[in-house]
C-alpha cells in the first residue's frame, strides 16, 4: 500500500501542491502568517517599550529620592527603604567606594554602569530578572535600586508562544484547505487526461468532461471538445469519401477482373502469348488495386466498430504458433526460416482474430523484405507489467526518420518503393493496436527491423 505522503484519495500530494488552488491558498496563508507575526511583534515591541519606560521612570524617581538623603544617613535610609518596599518587586543596596555591599537586599557584581538602567539575571532573588539603576552618592558610596521585570519576561515568552502557535495553526489550516480545494480540480484534470488519452489513440467519440460550474477548467474542456468535434467531422468526411470510393469501385473492378480472366482464357486458346501476358499484367495491377480497397475497408471497419465483445484472456504464444503455421510455406518458398522464440504462460487480453491479423501483416512484411537464407523470428518478451510481441528480420530495415511516417496510410519507406504492396499493411496493424490500447513501435534490429507490439500483461 503506498504511504499516505505519496497518495491521498488516489491523488499524489506531489501533484496537488502544483495546483493553482493549493498555491493560492499557500500564498494567502503566507501573507496571513506574516501579517499575524507582524501585528503581534509590533504589539509586543510597543508594549515592552512602554513597560520598560515606566520601569525606568520608577527607578529614576526612587533614585532621586535617595540622592537627596543627608550625608552619613545613607545606610539608615537604605534599611528604611528595604522595610518600606515590602511588595517583593523592588530592591535596594548600598555599596562602599570599594564595591563592597554595606547593606541591602540585592547583590550585584561590580562593575555596573552608573546613571543608566541595565538588566541582570543574578544578584536578586533566585530566578528573578531585574532592571537596575546605580548612582554614586556625594559620600562616594554607590546606591543601586532595582525592580523585578518578570512580567515583562513573561509577556515576551507568551508573545513568542502565541506567534509560534498561531503560525503553526495557520500553516496546518492552509495545508488542509489547500489540499481540500485541490482534490476536486485534480480529479477533473485526471478524468480529462484519461479522455484525452483515448482521443489521442484515435477514438474521437470521447469528449472531455464538463460541469455546470463553468469555471476555467470547463472553459478549456469546451474549447478542446469543440476542436475534437470539428476534427471528427472533417475526418468523417475524408474517411466517408475514401470508403465510398473503395466500396463503389470494388464491384466494377471485380467485374473487370472477371472479364480479363475470360480474355486470358481466350488468349490461351488462341495461343497468343503476347496478349495473354498483357492481360495477366493488367490482372496483377487490378489485384493490387482490389487489395488496397479491401485493406481500406478493413481499416475503416476496425476503426468504426470499436468492438470489445470478442476480447478475451489469451496466451499470445498460441497466436504466434498459428501465424507460423500459416506463413511457414511462404517463408520456405523464399528460402527463409520462420522461427518462434517464446515460452507460454504470458496472458494478455485481446481479440484473438484481430491480433492474428496484425501479427500476420508484420510477418508477411518481414518475409517480403528479409534476404534469402535468413531468419524471421517471432518472439515474446516479458516486461514488468506488459508483454512485448516482436517480429524481427535481418533485411534493410527502415531509417529512423521514416518509421513514424510508414505507419500512415499509403506511406511506404524509401527502400520499399520497388516492392509490391499497398502501403496499408502497417496502417491496419496500427488500427488493431489502437483498438486494443496497445503500443506499437518499429526499431533497429541491427541489422534489420524489429516490429514490436506491447500489450498490458494480466496476472
Image (spheres, helix red, strand yellow):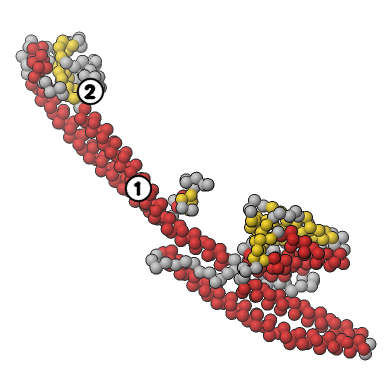
Residue 147 quadrant: top left
- Say above or below: 83 vs 174: above
Residue 197 quadrant: bottom right
Residue 334 % position (x, y): 86, 66
In the displayed structure image, the side of residue 197 where residue 127 appears, left or right: left
| Mark toward the start of the polypeptide (1 vs 2) | 2
Residue 365 quadrant: bottom right
Residue 368 % position (x, y): 80, 67
Residue 369 % position (x, y): 80, 65
Q: Nearer the viewer, mark 1 or mark 2?
A: 1
Residue 128, label in figure: 2
For the residue carrying disc 2, how many other residues have a C-alpha within 10 Å: few (<14), some (14-19), or many (20+)?
Answer: some
In the displayed structure image, the side of residue 69 where residue 9 appears, left or right: right
For the residue carrying disc 1, how many other residues have a C-alpha within 10 Å: few (<14), some (14-19), or many (20+)?
Answer: some
Query: Dot 2 lies on which element?
Result: loop
Residue at x 29%, y 46% (from the top left corner): 35
Amino acid at each position: 500500500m503506498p504511504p499516505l505522503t505519496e497518495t491521498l484519495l488516489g491523488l499524489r500530494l506531489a501533484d496537488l501542491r502544483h495546483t493553482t488552488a493549493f498555491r493560492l491558498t499557500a500564498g494567502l496563508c503566507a501573507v496571513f502568517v506574516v501579517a499575524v507575526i507582524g501585528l503581534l511583534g509590533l504589539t509586543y515591541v510597543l508594549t515592552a517599550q512602554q513597560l520598560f519606560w515606566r520601569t525606568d521612570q520608577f527607578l529614576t524617581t526612587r533614585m532621586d529620592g535617595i540622592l537627596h538623603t543627608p550625608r552619613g544617613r545613607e545606610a539608615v535610609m537604605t534599611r528604611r527603604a528595604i522595610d518600606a518596599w515590602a511588595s517583593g518587586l523592588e530592591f535596594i543596596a548600598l555599596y562602599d567606594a570599594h564595591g563592597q555591599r554595606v547593606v541591602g537586599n540585592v547583590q550585584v557584581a561590580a562593575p555596573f554602569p552608573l546613571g543608566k538602567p541595565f538588566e541582570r539575571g543574578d544578584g536578586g532573588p533566585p530566578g528573578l530578572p531585574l532592571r537596575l539603576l546605580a548612582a554614586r552618592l556625594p559620600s562616594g558610596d554607590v546606591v543601586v535600586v532595582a525592580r523585578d521585570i518578570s512580567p515583562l519576561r513573561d509577556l515576551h515568552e507568551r508573545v513568542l508562544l502565541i506567534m509560534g502557535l498561531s503560525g503553526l495553526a495557520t500553516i496546518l489550516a492552509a495545508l488542509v484547505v489547500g489540499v481540500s480545494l485541490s482534490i476536486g480540480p485534480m480529479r477533473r484534470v485526471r478524468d480529462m487526461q484519461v479522455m484525452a488519452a483515448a482521443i489521442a489513440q484515435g477514438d474521437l467519440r470521447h469528449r472531455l468532461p464538463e460541469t455546470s460550474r463553468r469555471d476555467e477548467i470547463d472553459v478549456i474542456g469546451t474549447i478542446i471538445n469543440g476542436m475534437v468535434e470539428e476534427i471528427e467531422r472533417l475526418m468523417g468526411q475524408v474517411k466517408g469519401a475514401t470508403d465510398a470510393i473503395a466500396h463503389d469501385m470494388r464491384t466494377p473492378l471485380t467485374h473487370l477482373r472477371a472479364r480479363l480472366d475470360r480474355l486470358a482464357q481466350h488468349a490461351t486458346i488462341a495461343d497468343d502469348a503476347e496478349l495473354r501476358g498483357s492481360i495477366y499484367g493488367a490482372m496483377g495491377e487490378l489485384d493490387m488495386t482490389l487489395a488496397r480497397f479491401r485493406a481500406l475497408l478493413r481499416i475503416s471497419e476496425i476503426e468504426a466498430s470499436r468492438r470489445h465483445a470478442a476480447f478475451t484472456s489469451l496466451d499470445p504464444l498460441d497466436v504466434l504458433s498459428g501465424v507460423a503455421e500459416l506463413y511457414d510455406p511462404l517463408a520456405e518458398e523464399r528460402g527463409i526460416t520462420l522461427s518462434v522464440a517464446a515460452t507460454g504462460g504470458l496472458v494478455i487480453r485481446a481479440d484473438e482474430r484481430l491480433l492474428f491479423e496484425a501479427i500476420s501483416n508484420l510477418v508477411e512484411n518481414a518475409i517480403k523484405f528479409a534476404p534469402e537464407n535468413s531468419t524471421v523470428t517471432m518472439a515474446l518478451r516479458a516486461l514488468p507489467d506488459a508483454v512485448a510481441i516482436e517480429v524481427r528480420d535481418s533485411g534493410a530495415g527502415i531509417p529512423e526518420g521514416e518509421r513514424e511516417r510508414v505507419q500512415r496510410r499509403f506511406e511506404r519507406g524509401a527502400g520499399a518503393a520497388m516492392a509490391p504492396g499497398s502501403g496499408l499493411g502497417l496502417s491496419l496493424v496500427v488500427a488493431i493496436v489502437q483498438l486494443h490500447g496497445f503500443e506499437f513501435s518499429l526499431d533497429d534490429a541491427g541489422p534489420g527491423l524489429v516490429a514490436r507490439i506491447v500489450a498490458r500483461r494480466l496476472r
